[in-house]
Image (cartoon, grey):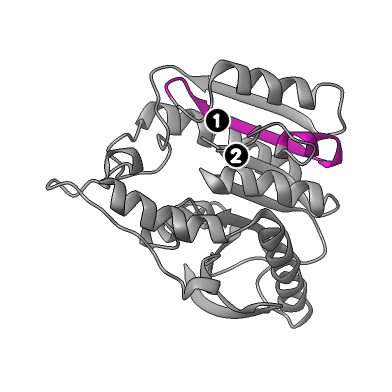
Amino acid sequence: MRERTVDITTADGIMPTFVTHPETGGPFAPVVLFMDVWGFREQLCDIARRIATVGYAALVPNLYYRKGGVTFDYRHEDGRTRSLKDLPKAEQDRIYAVHEHLTDPMVVADCAALLDFIDGDAANGGAIRGGGPVGSIGWCMGGRHVIRAAAAHPARFRATASLHPTRLVGEDGPDAPYRDAPKCRGEVYVGWGEHDHYAPAEVIATVRDAFKGQPASYDDVLHLGADHGYAIPDRDVFDKHAAARDWERIFAMYRRVLQP
């Protein structure tokens, strides 16, 4: 595997981005990983490596670069990462303060810079395939951001995976993320956790209804017994079976959409 960290220039500063892909072959179709509330960290780089081993160029942008690239890491004695809801309120407030600064329009603008980097890398003989469809995967807030990216850049983000997403419906205003469904193209997959407090039954139903009859092909799975955060390895709520079911569908989607 090849790995590097690149500095991508955006309107708001420099966004460090981890890039990995196979050593030989290529150019490789790009897949962008959208971080969860905890920020950029080695866990996400490991997931990028897993995606890259099957023939993709995986990119992990540090979307908290406007706050200096801060990351959060709270662990149990056995090494597993702790869930946000189990932290003291003061720590939750500290995390939410960073989380709330990152607006959806900021992420959409960052995606434009990412696409420019991808196409520029391709034009300069790099290992990333430019100009074509791009895959994505996001967790938690990243599960919302992938929908925003797909709607804002429908010609590019064509294989979208949203895992235990937050605030897809929210207060259900005219700018609620689920209302972006008609703008999306390609394929969209969502993994839900049965016990995810961010995704009660009415939220799941609302999202499903929003994608009915729309241009993007929509698929989802409700994982029985799974909690919010189930898809991240090393989490205290990690559900190995649910995560494996997600990967089965996600890799099949990438193969259909991204492989020439």
x and y percent of residue 208 in the render? 71, 22
**Type of residue at label 1?**
Gly
Query: Which of the 4 image quadrants contains residue 210?
Result: top right
As helix, strand or loop, the secondary structure at mark 2 comes to strand
As helix, strand or loop, the secondary structure at mark 1 comes to strand
Q: Residue at x 67, y 37 (%)?
A: 253
Question: What numbered label is drawn on residue 43?
Answer: none
Viewer-nearest residue: 98 or 42: 98
Q: Which residues are magenta?
A: 178-195
Which residue sits furthest left? 77
Q: Is residue 65 left or right of residue 29?
A: left
Which one is earlier in the sequence, the residue at label 2 or at label 1? 2
Q: Is residue 193 magenta?
A: yes
x and y percent of residue 191 in the render? 55, 30
Q: Residue at x 40, y 24 (%)?
A: 226
Q: CA distance from mark 2 to mark 1?
A: 6 Å
**Type of residue at label 2?**
Ser
Residue occupied by mark 1: 191
Q: Residue at x 76, y 66 (%)?
A: 112
Instruction: Mark 2: give few (<14), some (14-19) or many (20+) Cα within 10 Å.
Output: many
x and y percent of residue 163 in the render? 54, 37
User: Do the numbered discs 2 and 1 sit on residues whose CB atoms are within 8 Å?
Assistant: yes
Query: Which of the 4 image quadrants contains residue 42?
Result: bottom left
Residue 182 in view (yes/no): yes
Residue occupied by mark 2: 162
Query: Which of the 4 image quadrants contains residue 121?
Result: bottom right
Q: Is residue 153 above or below residue 24?
A: above
Q: Residue at x 43, y 16 (%)?
A: 224
Residue 49 in view (yes/no): no
